[in-house]
Image: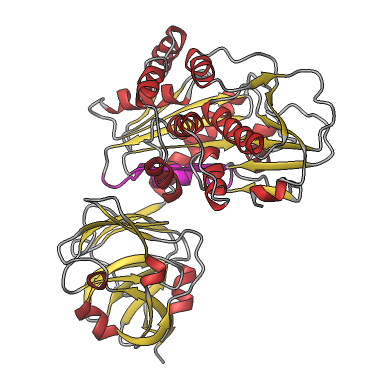
Amino acid sequence: MKLSDLLKFDNIVIQCHDNPDADAIGSGFALYSFFKEKGKKVRFIYSGKKKISKSNLEYLIGALEIPIEFEQSSIGNPDLLLTCDCQYGESNVTMFDAKEIAIIDHHQVAPGKRLPALNEIRSGIGSCCTVIWDMMKKEKYQPGPEVSSAMYYGLFTDTNSLSELFHPLDKDMLEELYVDQVLLRRLNGMNISLEEAKIAGVALLGVEYHQDHNYAILEAQPCDPNILGLISDFFLAVDTVNVCLVFSVLDYGVKFSIRSDYAEVRADELAAYISEKIGSGGGHVNKAGGFIQNELLEQEYKRYAESTDKEKAAAVTSILRERLHDYFTSVDVIYAGKTKVTTKGMKEYVKMPIKQGYAIPKEFLPIGTKVLVRTLEGDIYLTVEEDTVIMIGIRGEVYPSTQTVFKKNYKKLKGKYDLKLEYSPTVRILSTSEIIDLIPVAKMCVSTGGNHILARPLKRRAKVFTKWLKNDYLNGEIGDYLAMKLSDQDDVYIIGKDLFKESYEVVK
C-alpha cells in the first residue's frame, strides 16, 4: 500500500492504540500532517480507559502541538479509519465504525488474522514511525521539523534508546531526520517517574538466577520499555551474570529486554529466538529486546490462553524460562581451528555456476576511502583498496572480497545487476556522509564452480566462530548446513539451507 492510495478519501480518522506510547503518537502525528497538507479533513485520536498521563508524553504533545484527541464515544463513521502502530480488531485497539479500514504497523500479524485490503505491515522494522517515514519518502514528502522530532523520538523509545535498533531502514531514518536535540534532552530527563524507579527496585528483588548457564530472568510491573533496559543494564553488572532478560506483561502482550556480555550469546540473536512465532525481536550484539503479541502467544501456548489475568505473569515466566533453557542446551558451539569437527556424514559438494552481482569500489571511489556498506544483514565497515570487491549474493546478501578470490572463482558477464531486493544496499562515505546506491554500480558475474566443500545438514543448532570472523559467530538452525573447505578442513562455516540448495550440488 502507498500513502497516495489513501488520498481518494476525504474524511480520515487516524487512530493509534489505547494507552499510546511515543511511537504511536509520532506515527499518528506524521500521518495527520501528511493528510492535512493534502487538504483532507483529518482527526488523530486514541481511546481506552484513561488519558495519556506520562510526563514525557504530555511534554512531547505540548511542545510539538500534536493534535491528538482522547475519544471514547463515536467518530461519526468517517470515509477512512487508519490505525497506526496497531492492527484494527486487536485487544489494545478500541473498535470504531468506518466506511473503510486501513492499517500501518510494524508488529507481526497473527496467523489466520484477516486484514483489510489497505494495509502496510512490516514486521521486521523497529518502529511504526520508520514505516511511515519510508512511505513518505516514496511519495517525495519531507516531514517538517516538529514531525521529524516526533518520529525520531518514536523510534528512540521503541528501540530502548536505540539499543534495540536492527533494521537498516531505522538507521537510515535516524541519519536523515531532523531532531530537536534540546527537546530530546528534555524528554530523556522525564523518562523515569518515581513510581517506575520503585518498579525497578521491586524487579531486582525478584530475580531468578540460573547458575548452570549464568543467566537471570526478572519480571517488572507494567512500565515504559526504557525501564526494562535500565534494569537489565544494572543486573548485567553482577559478576556471575552473563545474560539478563527482563520482561513486563502488558494488556496487549509482553515487552522484554536482553543484555549479554558473553561472546557465545548475541543479544539480538537471543531476542529473535525468544520471540520466534510469538512476536519479534532484535537489536545489537550486547543489547536487544522485543515484543511478544497476545494473539500469537495464545495460539502457540494453550496454558497462556487459559490463564486468568492474575496467572498470565506466571505463565509468561514459565514460557520464557523454557525458551531460555532450550536456547542454551540445544546448541553446539564450534571454534574453527580449535574444535575438532568430524567429517562423518559429510558429502562433497561443488558450487554451481550461478549468476550474482559484484561492484569494484575503486571504480567509483578513491582508494583509501573509508566507507560503511549498509545491508539488510547489518553494517560492514571497510577501506577501499586496490583489490577490494563487494559481492552481492543470489539472495541479496553482501560481503567483501578481493580481486584475487574473485578472479579464481568468478567470471565477469555483460550487463548490470538488477535483482529486486527488500532493502537496496548502500555505500556511505564516512567522511562526507555521501550515500551511493550499490545496485546501479553493480555488474553481473557467474561462479565458475571451482569451490569444493564438505557439508552435512545440522541435526542440532550450531554457532560457528569462523577463521575470518573470530569475535562473532554464524548461527545455524536445524536443516542448515555445516560446511568446510575441502582444501582446508579448519575453515568451517554455516550455509543456510535455502541458499545451500540453490548454490551447491553433490559431487557424484
Residue 129 picture location, percent across and down: 53, 38
**In the displayed structure, would residue 341 be above or below residue 19?**
below
Say which quarter of the image contains residue 354.
bottom left
Question: 225 or 132, which lies in front?
Answer: 132
Residue depicted at 77% across the width and 42% down the height: 9
In the picture, which quadrant includes the C terminus? bottom left
In the image, taking residue 87 as reference, residue 462 lies left or right, namely left
Is residue 273 highlighted in magenta? Answer: yes
Q: Is residue 111 visible?
A: no
The type of colouring in the image is secondary structure
In the image, taking residue 174 as reference, residue 388 lies left or right, namely left
Question: 280 or 369, which lies in front?
Answer: 369
**In the displayed structure, would residue 408 be above or below residue 36?**
below
- Looking at the image, the residue that sits furthest to the bottom is 508
Say which quarter of the image contains residue 425.
bottom left
**In the displayed structure, would residue 75 be above or below residue 438?**
above
Is residue 164 highlighted in magenta? Answer: no
Q: Give the magenta-colored segment's residue range.
A: 263-284
